């Protein structure tokens, strides 16, 4: 079993920055992919960014150039540096992990609000 714990959400004005962190704990797992999704009320959850074991990354178009995902394999952690935040980035952000055993795990979510 894998537990994901997120931190770093909050309220920030447009143009501001936030850094989200997510740490995986448990035993007997080997994570292939870690990343972040977000969800606005009444909308589907959408992929924001992901990093695959080996170092490749992908981003949704609307965050390219503003968000950076990074990963610390030794700590089973993933981070999302969010710069130049916009009101449309407001959502609950969820950390997820996909293991080599083809199981996926989700964090509890952290609220990001971009507003003046």
Image (cartoon, rainbow, N blue to C red):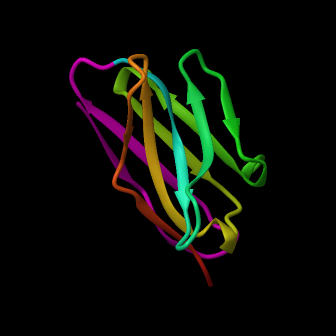
Q: Reply yes or no: does residue 19 show up in magenta.
A: yes
- Left or right, 67 with respect to 75, comes to right
Task: Give the percent coordinates (x, y) of residue 89.
Answer: 64, 65
Q: Split into 4 quadrants, where in the image is the N terminus?
A: top left
Q: Split into 4 quadrants, where in the image is the C terminus?
A: bottom right
Residue 57 figure quarter: top right
Task: Give the percent coordinates (x, y) of residue 111.
Answer: 45, 66
Q: Relative to 14, say whether 27 is above or below.
A: above
- Left or right, 61 with respect to 31, comes to right
Q: Nearer the viewer, residue 110 or 100?
A: 100
Task: Give the percent coordinates (x, y) of residue 70.
Answer: 56, 34
Residue at coordinates 54% horizontally, 50% vertically from top-left?
A: 37
> Predominant secondary structure in magenta?
strand
Residue at coordinates 39% horizontally, 57% vertically from top-left?
A: 109
Q: How many numbered marks appear?
A: 0
Task: Give the percent coordinates (x, y) of residue 71.
Answer: 50, 30
Q: Nearer the viewer, residue 48 or 81?
A: 48
- Left or right, 64 with respect to 70, comes to right
- Left or right, 47 with respect to 7, comes to right
Q: Relative to 110, say whether 36 is above or below.
A: above
Q: Relative to 116, say whether 4 is above or below.
A: above
Residue 24 figure quarter: top left
Magenta residues (range): 1-29
Q: Reply yes or no: does residue 102 show up in magenta.
A: no
């Amino acid at each position: 079993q894998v537990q994901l714990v997120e931190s770093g959400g909050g309220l920030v004005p447009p143009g501001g920055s936030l850094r989200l962190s997510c740490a995986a704990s448990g035993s007997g797992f080997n994570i292939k992919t870690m990343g972040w999704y977000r969800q606005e009320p009444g909308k589907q959850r959408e992929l924001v960014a992901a990093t695959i074991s080996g170092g490749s990354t992908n981003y949704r178009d609307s965050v390219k150039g503003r968000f950076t995902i990074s990963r610390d394999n030794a700590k089973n952690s993933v981070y999302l540096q969010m710069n130049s935040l916009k009101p449309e980035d407001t959502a609950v952000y969820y950390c997820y992990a996909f293991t080599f055993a083809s199981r996926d795990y989700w964090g509890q979510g952290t609220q990001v609000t971009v507003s003046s």
